[in-house]
Structure formats: C-alpha cells, structure tokens
C-alpha cells in the first residue's frame, strides 16, 4: 500500500488547513497518511489560541491520531526559522529534513498540497 502525503504549507489558521487535517485523519483509517507541515504551515501545530481568532483549533482532531495510521511531520528548518521548539507543538511531531520529505513524497501514491 502506497502512502498519501498531505503537504500543508499555507495559512495555518484557515479552513483549508483544518480540512486537510480532518480529511487526512479520515483517510488514515484505511491508508498510511503523512500530514507534513512546512513553511508557515508549521504554526498550525503550535500552541496558539484559536478562540482569539474565533475559529476551531486542531487539538480535538489530533486527540485521535493514535488510533489511525497517520503521522505528523514538521520540516525541521521551517520550525527552526520560526523559533519553534518541540515543546511548542500541541502533539509531538516527527521532525524531518527537506531531503527526507522529498523522499517521502517520491514514494507516495498521492500527494495533496494545501
């Protein structure tokens, strides 16, 4: 079974990012899914106050990630450039280099860019 990669790179507080996480977790029931956060997308997994923006956060969605075949991946240099440390994330992600993420994408059966 080939994996599915969700490449989340845009506005971390938008409905698109929320939907990417929701759909990715749904697909992870029957598929291997990687939710890969790069560039400003890394902020989506950071500790922030969604209620200040009057939107839903990701904590409720991510509570069930252990029950599906999904992995949270953060591009290490994107997090570093934004001053984010492992303790700054609501769920502990897997940190990968851009080279390793490229390999993940090359081996995937599908890549969805958000």
Image (cartoon, rainbow, N blue to C red):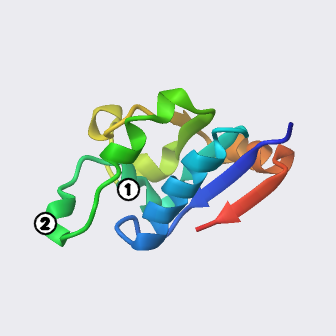
Please tell me which residue is depicted at 31% across the width and 48% down the height of the picture. Answer: 46
Q: Quick check: 57 above or below 76? A: below
Q: Nearer the viewer, residue 57 or 13?
A: 57
Residue occupied by mark 2: 52
How far across and how far down the image is residue 109, in percent? 85, 50
Left or right placement of residue 34 versus residue 92 in this view: right
Left or right placement of residue 24 versus residue 39 in this view: right
How far across and how far down the image is residue 94, in percent? 53, 33
- Secondary structure of residue under mark 2: helix
Q: Quick check: 10 above or below 64? A: below
Instruction: Judge the density around disc 1: few (<14), some (14-19), many (≥20) Cα neighbours within 10 Å.
Output: many
How far across and how far down the image is residue 83, in percent? 31, 48
Sequence-first tag of 2 and 1: 1
Using the image, tell me which numbered label, if any, was put on residue 20.
none
- Secondary structure of residue under mark 1: helix
The N terminus - image quarter: top right
Q: Nearer the viewer, residue 82 or 44?
A: 44
Instruction: Judge the density around disc 2: few (<14), some (14-19), many (≥20) Cα neighbours within 10 Å.
Output: few
Please tell me which residue is depicted at 80% across the width and 56% down the height of the picture. Answer: 110
Please tell me which residue is depicted at 35% across the width and 51% down the height of the picture. Answer: 58
Residue occupied by mark 1: 44
Please tell me which residue is depicted at 68% across the width and 45% down the height of the picture. Answer: 101
How far across and how far down the image is residue 105, in percent? 77, 50
């Amino acid at each position: 079974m080939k994996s599915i990669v969700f490449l989340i790179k845009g506005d971390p507080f938008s409905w698109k990012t929320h939907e990417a996480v929701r759909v990715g977790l749904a697909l992870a029931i029957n598929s291997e899914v990687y939710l890969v956060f790069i560039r400003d997308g890394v902020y989506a997994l950071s500790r922030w106050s969604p209620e200040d923006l009057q939107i839903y956060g990701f904590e409720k969605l991510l509570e069930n990630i252990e029950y599906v075949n999904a992995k949270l991946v953060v591009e290490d240099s994107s997090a570093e450039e934004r001053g984010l440390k492992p303790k700054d994330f609501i769920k502990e992600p897997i940190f990968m280099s851009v080279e390793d993420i490229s390999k993940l994408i090359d081996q995937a059966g599908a890549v969805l860019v958000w």
